[in-house]
Image (cartoon, rainbow, N blue to C red):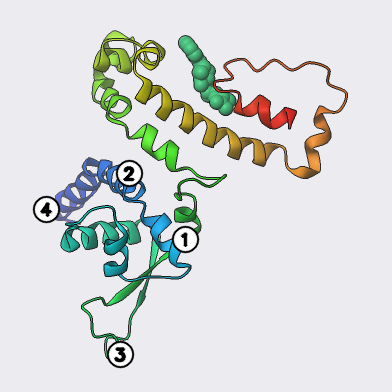
Amino acid sequence: MNTSNEELHELADITKCTFSFVDSMVLKCAVELRIADIIRSHGKSITLSQIASSIDSPSVNLGNLKRVMRMLVRMKIFTTQKLDTETHKSSDDVLYGLTPFSSMLVHDVDITLAPFVLMENYPMMAIPWHYLSDVVKEGGSGFKKANGVELFEMARKDPELNKIFNNAMRCITKIFFKGLFSTNNRDVFNGVNSVVDVGGGMGQFIGEIVN
Ligand SMILES: C[S@@+](CC[C@H](N)C(=O)[O-])C[C@H]1O[C@@H](n2cnc3c(N)ncnc32)[C@H](O)[C@@H]1O
């Protein structure tokens, strides 16, 4: 490979790394717009116009929604299926469907990772990553450098952060618990008289054990 070709490859690789944050933002956008919920509520794959008409806004920008959906499909979060445009007279040319990934982004169900996506991409939680080089140079926490106080002090002061954080912890804990203690092996707690849940948050884990 000659030097200019190598440089083109490096440009492609570095560009991909540089914009990898866009995946997080597109994922957050899908959760905020409740796209998985919308498709699930139809019980089958649906068109862009159907998604748009269920988004909580009177002025959805179809072009921007289509770009976001294209990214989500590339990320394998939704599927696409070509529509027969002969029989469909609208401008919609594909149907969007759920995947196992997007099934985990539905809100208000028992097993979901939507609260985790919202917490990790909440600005107060995401901006500390911009302080990573300072954390390397000086030590300390990125959260404090970005927000002025440590995470749990901020959670005590800020009810919205507290709620977002605890909801995320709860949803992860439910999945951990289900994975670790399936109905077949719940008897690992037989004969245990006392359990201490250190750092138990809202008590989701201990609650699962007790139930
Ligand atoms: C990984 S989470 C565990 C979540 C828990 N299993 C649940 O289901 O909610 C760790 C928990 O420890 C608590 N924690 C850890 N360090 C803390 C600190 N410095 N101050 C207050 N709470 C802290 C937080 O409540 C946090 O939710």
Q: Looking at the rendered structure, which numbered label has been put on residue 87?
A: 3
Question: Does the closest atom of ligand 1 sit within 8 Å of the Cβ of label 1?
Answer: no
Horizontal placement of 90 versus 154: left or right? Answer: left
Mark 3, other Cα within 10 Å: few <14 / some 14–19 / many ≥20: few
Mark 2, other Cα within 10 Å: few <14 / some 14–19 / many ≥20: many
Q: Residue 95, image x and y in percent?
A: 35, 73
Quadrant of the frame with the N terminus: bottom left
Q: Amino acid at mark 1?
A: Thr
Q: Nearer the viewer, mark 4 or mark 2?
A: 2
> Disc 1 and disc 2: Cα gap in Å?
17 Å
Q: Residue at x 51, y 45 (%)?
A: 112
> Disc 3 and disc 4: Cα gap in Å?
49 Å
Quarter-wise, where is residue 156 in the image? top left
Horizontal placement of 68 versus 181: left or right? Answer: left
On the image, numbered disc 2 is attached to which residue? 28
* Residue 34 in the image: above or below residue 52: above
On the image, numbered disc 1 is attached to which residue? 99
Residue contact at pointers 3 and 4, CB within 8 angstroms: no
Q: Residue at x 30, y 12 (%)?
A: 144
| SS under mark 4 | helix
Q: Residue at x 41, y 56 (%)?
A: 36
